[in-house]
Amino acid sequence: MSTHIQIFLDDQALSLPAPLSLADLLQAHQRAPESVATALNGMFVAREARAQTQLAHGDAVLLFKAIVGG
């Protein structure tokens, strides 16, 4: 019996198997890690921290197009 969690990805509800990291979520949705910036529950998550960032039931993930420059 597998455990599922409900998360929100860009305001869309998803039911996904747990455990699931932020990096796993990006891979499952075929998003290149270098092409997006990520926020979890309103807080920025650096690319280097995504593999260690575990998602929990009710989490809200937002993906942003990565912008370079200034």
Image (cartoon, grey):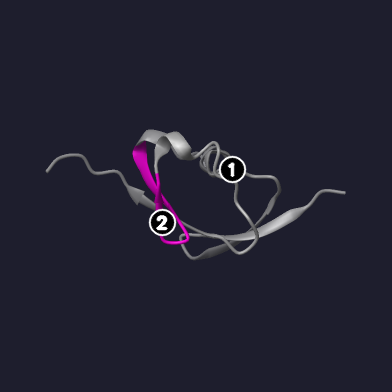
Q: Residue at x 37, y 34 (%)?
A: 34
Number of on-image labels: 2
- Looking at the image, residue 62 sits to the left or right of residue 8; the answer is left
- Check the picture and name the quadrant holding the C terminus: top left
Q: Residue at x 23, y 44 (%)?
A: 67
Extreme residue in the right direction: 1
For marks 1 and 2, give the one nearer the viewer: 2
The x, y position of residue 21, in whole percent, is 59, 43
Q: CA distance from mark 1 to mark 2?
A: 15 Å
- Looking at the image, residue 6 sits to the left or right of residue 11; the answer is right
**Nearer to us in this view, 2 or 51:** 51
Circle 1 residue: 21
Instruction: Judge the density around disc 1: few (<14), some (14-19), many (≥20) Cα neighbours within 10 Å.
Output: some
Circle 2 residue: 43
Secondary structure beneath disc 1?
A: loop
The x, y position of residue 15, in whole percent, is 67, 58
Secondary structure beneath disc 2?
A: strand
Q: Residue at x 53, y 64 (%)?
A: 12
**Nearer to us in this view, 62 or 44:** 44
Q: Residue at x 69, y 57 (%)?
A: 5
CB-based contact (under 8 Å), mark 1 and mark 2: no
Q: Amino acid at mark 2?
A: Met
**Nearer to us in this view, 44 or 31:** 44
Q: Amino acid at mark 1?
A: Ser
Q: Which residues are magenta?
A: 35-45
The x, y position of residue 22, in whole percent, is 53, 44
Q: Let me know if residue 7 is in the magenta part.
A: no
Q: With respect to residue 12, does 4 lie above or below?
A: above
Badge 1 or badge 2: first in the primary sequence: 1
Q: Quadrant of residue 19?
A: top right
